[in-house]
Structures are given as structure tokens and as C-alpha cells.
Amino acid sequence: MANSGSVSRWIKKLKRGESIAATHVWDRYHDNLLRLARRRLIGASRRVAFEEDVVCTAFQSFFRRAREGQFPELAGRDELWALLSTITHRKAVNVLRVEQSQK
């Protein structure tokens, strides 16, 4: 597990658009976000496919917005986890809404 200094450096590099930092963040947080998405998507008909899709779109959104400078106060591991989990939760809720509206 990375220390908070490493995560802080990754965040700075992400904001500069350095792709290697995105790889580190993905590796560090992917499994935790997948578990979060799985819990949020209980009851979805195609849950396994949705889980990975939710996590991928959450990361895409986060990486794009970080490069665009939308998270100027983001600096540490706790803030990063809170942000990634919030984005993932919202993506999962949106998937459920779409699925339920199609029924």
C-alpha cells in the first residue's frame, strides 16, 4: 500500500496530465471501487458487467476533470478516496435509474 506522500505526488502529476499517475491511482483504488460499485448495484440485472463499467466511467470522469483543473483543493489520500467513492456511487445510482426506467 502506498503512503500518503505517494498519493499526494500522484495527484499533483494527474493535475499536470501525467498518465503514469493515472496508472498508479487505478492500481491503488480499482478493487476498492469495484467493491463499492458491487454493493450499490445489488439488484441490477447485469450487475457484474455494470460494476466494471461504473468503475471505468468513474475513473474516466475523475481523470478528465483532474486534468481540467476541477479539483484544485484535492491534495491527499483521504480526499482522493472520498472523491472517487462519491463519483463511483453517483455513477452506480445513474445505472440503476436507467435500468429501472427501461423496465
Image (cartoon, rainbow, N blue to C red):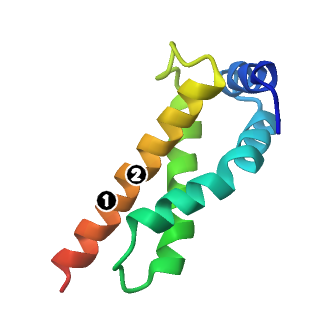
What's the distance in space between the residues labelled 1 and 2, CA to CA?
6 Å
Q: Secondary structure at mark 1?
A: helix
Q: Secondary structure at mark 2?
A: helix
Determine whether 82 is above or below 72 in the image: below
Task: Provide residue 45's location: percent of width, then percent of height.
Answer: 37, 86
Are there few (<14), some (14-19), or many (20+) residues within 10 Å of tag 1?
some
Q: Are marks 1 and 2 in contact (CB under 8 Å)?
A: yes
Q: Is residue 89 above or below residue 52?
A: above
**Residue at the spot of label 2:** 89
Give the percent coordinates (x, y) of residue 10.
75, 27
Q: Nearer the viewer, residue 11 or 32?
A: 32
Where is residue 27? Give x, y as percent.
Answer: 77, 49
Q: Which residue is mark 1?
A: 93
Mark 1: amino acid: Val
What residue is shown at x 29% (from left), y 69% (from top)?
A: 96
The residue depicted at 39 percent of the width and 63 percent of the height is: 40
